Amino acid sequence: MTVPRAASYLFVPGNRPERYAKALSCGADAVIVDLEDAVPPAAKAAARDELRQWLRGANARVIVRVNAAETSWFADDLAACASPNVAAIMLPKADNPGDLAACARVAPHARLLPLVETAAGFDALRSLVTVPGVERIVFGSIDFQLDLGISGEGEELLFFRSQLVLASRLGGLAAPVDGVSTEIQDAGIVQADAAKARRLGFGAKLCIHPSQVAPVNAAFRPTAQEVEWARRVLDASARAEGAAAVVDGKMIDLPVVLRARAILEQET
């Protein structure tokens, strides 16, 4: 499977169609029209109608976060996703491969993004990654904390984040998408959160405000120091012609060379 280059996934409320264009133009790699958390119950039907109308004349493709499978809105949300302008369906509270299969039946053209945000979803990870059409796993970290009674956002979630990375790799999926940062004013905090996710093996991050897009994108690009190191590794490897080489006092072998190549590929 080709690994997506998308690093930033920006939510826009489904009931605010006047914001769709701004979201699409702010530099995010992907835009998620949210029919779930961002829309109050009384506005669900109207938001779906607004989205459906926009999709008819859209010249861009979006991801749609539908309401969870156990809700009364799920079937109608899926029906709206039959539009070819829906690039992917994000399924919240994903814990059942059958629900993902239902999404695929209604919108076979759309990729699937299961949102793991419950204990049941985490327990079902190995099954979710095998469903045809699933592109990558998304971590709903805030809801996950709530479901498990976890009060911290840092090391308290390290085990669970690492397991999402492992399951994605074993399932042949793209690196998973990390959950949101609630900070929307301090770009440094957002970039640090995203950089930590990248170090853990995540390939992208959810954004809840346009101000988060630039720091998230920056965090998932190789730094100047990483690029310079990668070039020196490849130069040293080429000069050694397959023999052992040393860079910065450290022996380099094939895995190090492959890592250097991957860094330079990310730069392009």
Image: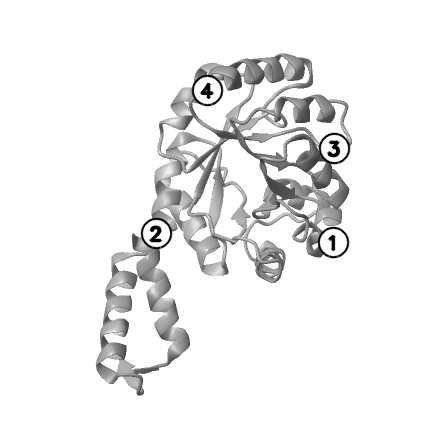
Would you name the residue on which mark 1 appears?
Answer: 123
Q: Are marks 2 and 4 in contact (CB under 8 Å)?
A: no
Would you name the residue on which mark 2 appears?
Answer: 221
Q: Residues within 10 Å of mark 2 (few under 14, many from 20)?
A: some
Q: Are marks 4 and 1 in contact (CB under 8 Å)?
A: no
User: Does 80 sit left or right of 202 as displayed?
Assistant: right
Mark 3: which amino acid? Ala
Helix, strand or loop at disc 1?
A: helix
Which is nearer the N-term, disc 3 or disc 1? 3
Find the distance from the CA under tag 4 to the CA under tag 1: 38 Å
Find the distance from the CA under tag 2 to the CA under tag 4: 30 Å
Would you name the residue on which mark 3 appears?
Answer: 69
Q: Is residue 261 above or below residue 77?
A: below
Mark 2: which amino acid? Arg
Between residue 185 and residue 71, name the one nearer to us. 71
Mark 1: which amino acid? Asp
Quadrant hosting residue 111: top right
Q: Position of residue 202 (x, y in %)?
A: 50, 54
Disc number lying in front (3 or 4): 4
